[in-house]
């Protein structure tokens, strides 16, 4: 029995040394002069044997978990990069809104001054005339790409709900679509579509001008009695609300009394945040009573209204893009957090599988030693 115990102890010691990363678990033997002739190949083989490190052989399950951990880590890097890219684009959208603000203020001020000079009741302009509504054109703004949470789906549901509501009232309806996601959805379902445009990541005045011209032609030609705009109103980085408003015909009182607000992207405690600032209504420009206009003030107002429409469409496009980018930031942040949690769970599974593999091999050695008893 003592001999058997010594044999088992020796086998366990050998197994423990086999799983040690140091080279002490392996032995090399040198011979004295005259005892053995050592050639170059023998020296090379002995050096390689001395530098060899022990490796743990794991099963396929452990290797699969290790590969999945590496894949999830790479995915997390991609989602974090997409979040930072979206944050940079939000700043660009913020700067674009601030750049167009002086023009909007001046336009609103001149319009208010002219309305006060000639009186709002004396206006008889097509863009300010309310008609009996028999047909409505819905201008729907969605995004061109996905990976932005429920941004596109919320806007599409809002447009579908408004379309069915108008149809239930006996009002005919068609759509002017802006954004690839909305175009794909409503085209496949055979909705009446008047025209389509892409949103892009950086809306400009040229794009807004093309859309406003189509809207003006549709309304002034009598093809539609009202134009409604459906867009996503930017509130914060985690909140955006699908909104609807009547774009045409205009309301003179709404133009002169409507304020504005701007937002700025900031960082606080290592996290992105948005600060909003409410802006007061631009003061109407004062025109002296003895001022003589080269053109009739009504004609001037009629020329200002398309510019105002162009500015409103550009602003809504910029706000929709900012909402899409904010939704993408939030979505990528959630994806990164989920990837981090998944890596933790997979690491625990990997360590357990590795420990189980080592334990199984030790048990096999102990069982072999017990068989010698």
Image (cartoon, helix red, strand yellow):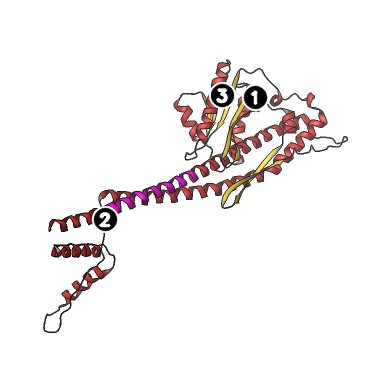
- Using the numbered discs, state the Cα–Cα distance from disc 3 to disc 2 in whole angstroms: 64 Å
Main secondary structure of the magenta stretch: helix
Say if the magenta span includes residue 76. Answer: no
Q: Which residues are magenta?
A: 333-357
Residue 205, horizontal then vertical, whole percent: 62, 40
Q: Would you identify the image quadrant in which residue 216 lies?
A: top right
**Residue at the disc numbered 1:** 220
- Using the numbered discs, state the Cα–Cα distance from disc 2 to disc 1 in whole angstroms: 81 Å
Q: Nearer the viewer, residue 335 or 17?
A: 17
Give above or below for 79 relative to 234.
below
Give above or below for 356 relative to 194.
below
**Residue at the disc numbered 2:** 358
Residue 94, horizontal then vertical, whole percent: 62, 45
Instruction: Let me know if residue 147 appears in the view.
Output: yes
- Using the numbered discs, state the Cα–Cα distance from disc 1 to disc 3 in whole angstroms: 23 Å
Q: Residue at x 62, y 26 (%)?
A: 227
Q: Can you say which quadrant of the picture contains the N terminus?
A: bottom left
Q: What is the residue that sits farthest to the top in this orientation?
A: 170
- Of label 1 and label 3, which has the lower sequence position? 3
Residue 197, horizontal then vertical, whole percent: 53, 34
Q: Secondary structure at mark 3?
A: helix
**Residue at the disc numbered 3:** 162
Is the C-beta separation of discs 2 and 1 under 8 Å?
A: no
How many other residues sit within 10 Å of disc 3, few (<14), some (14-19) or many (≥20)? some
| Labelled disc at residue 138 | none
């Amino acid at each position: 029995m003592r001999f058997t115990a010594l044999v088992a102890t020796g086998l366990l010691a050998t197994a423990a040394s086999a799983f040690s990363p140091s080279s002490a678990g392996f032995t090399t033997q040198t011979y004295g002069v005259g005892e053995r002739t050592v050639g170059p190949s023998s020296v090379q083989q002995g050096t390689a044997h001395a530098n060899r490190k022990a490796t743990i052989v794991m099963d396929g399950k452990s290797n699969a978990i290790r590969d999945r951990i590496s894949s999830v880590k790479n995915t997390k890097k991609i989602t974090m990069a997409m979040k930072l890219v979206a944050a940079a684009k939000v700043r660009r959208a913020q700067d674009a809104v601030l750049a167009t603000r002086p023009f909007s203020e001046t336009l609103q001020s001149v319009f208010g001054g002219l309305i006060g000079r000639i009186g709002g009741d004396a206006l008889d302009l097509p863009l300010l005339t309310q008609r009996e509504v028999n047909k409505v054109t819905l201008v729907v703004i969605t995004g061109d790409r996905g990976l932005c949470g429920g941004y596109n789906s919320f806007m599409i549901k809002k447009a579908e709900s408004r379309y069915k509501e108008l149809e239930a009232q006996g009002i005919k309806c068609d759509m002017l679509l802006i954004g690839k996601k909305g175009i794909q959805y409503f085209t496949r379902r055979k909705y009446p579509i008047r025209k389509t445009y892409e949103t892009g990541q950086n809306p400009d005045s040229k794009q807004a001008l093309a859309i406003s011209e189509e809207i003006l032609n549709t309304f002034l030609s009598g093809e539609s009695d009202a134009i409604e705009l459906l867009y996503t109103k930017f509130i914060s980085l985690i909140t955006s609300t699908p909104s609807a408003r009547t774009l045409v015909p205009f309301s003179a009182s709404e133009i002169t009394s409507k304020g504005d607000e701007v937002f700025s992207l900031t960082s606080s405690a290592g996290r992105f945040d948005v600060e909003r600032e409410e802006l007061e209504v631009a003061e109407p420009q004062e025109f002296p009573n003895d001022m003589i206009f080269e053109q009739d003030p009504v004609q001037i107002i009629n020329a200002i209204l398309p510019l105002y429409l162009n500015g409103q469409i550009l602003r809504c496009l910029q706000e929709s893009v900012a909402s899409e980018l904010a939704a993408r930031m939030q979505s990528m942040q959630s994806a990164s957090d989920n990837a981090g949690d998944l890596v933790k769970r997979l690491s625990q599974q990997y360590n357990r599988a590795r420990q189980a593999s080592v334990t199984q091999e030790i048990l096999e050695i102990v069982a072999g030693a017990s068989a010698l008893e």
